[in-house]
Amino acid sequence: MSIRIDHQKCTGCGKCREVCPGNLLQAADSGQTEITNPKDCWGCTSCLKECKCKAIQYYLGADMGGRGSLLCIRQEGNVLHWVVVLPDGQEKIITVDKNQANAY
Ligand code: SF4
Ligand code: SF4
């Protein structure tokens, strides 16, 4: 269980580093973010929600029924789109209005 950071997209803003409860995200010499101990990531997805550059993806391995799919989050105002990208490139999207979160 871990995340992947796309360094083609990461601007080094540091928002993800501020929210990781395990303090797993650190600034590299380049200023971009790296994960120090991927095996310690427990998949809280806080960093995904903070990253406005869509640079962080979360692995959905076989242990989570994902068979190598990747999860990312796209935000539009108060709406979060949880996007699962399947190994064949297809996308499955779950949309959640944060104002209605208690209704789910
Ligand atoms: S929030 Fe995204 S863009 Fe900012 S440092 Fe983290 S991975 Fe990079
Ligand atoms: S998913 Fe949670 S525990 Fe894992 S790196 Fe991101 S903020 Fe840290």
Image: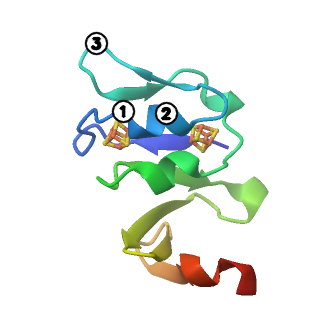
Q: Are marks 1 and 2 in contact (CB under 8 Å)?
A: yes
- At numbered mark 1, what does the secondary structure look like: helix, strand or loop? loop
**Residue ID for mark 2:** 18
Dot in front, 1 or 3: 1
Cα separation between marks 3 and 2: 17 Å
Q: Is the shortest distance between ligand 1 and the CB of mark 1 under 8 Å?
A: yes
| Circle 2: element type | helix
Which tag, 1 or 3, sits closer to the chain's start?
1
**Position of 20 compared to 51: left or right?**
right
Coordinates of residue 22 in the picture (x, y in percent): 66, 29
* Amino acid found under the numbered disc labelled 2: Glu
Q: Position of residue 23 (x, y in %)?
A: 60, 25
Quarter in which the N terminus is drawn = top right
- Residue at 46% x, 64% y is 73
Which amino acid type is marked by label 1?
Answer: Gly
Quadrant of ligand 1: it is: top left
Tell me what residue is drawn at x 54 percent, y 20 percent.
Answer: 36
Residue 29, horizontal then vertical, whole percent:
28, 12
**Where does residue 38 sit, x and y in percent of width and height?**
60, 30
Q: Is mark 3 within 8 Å of ligand 1?
A: no
Residue linked to disc 1? 14
The residue at the far front in this view is: 99
Q: Mark 3 belongs to which amino acid?
A: Asp
Foreground disc of the pair 3, 2: 2
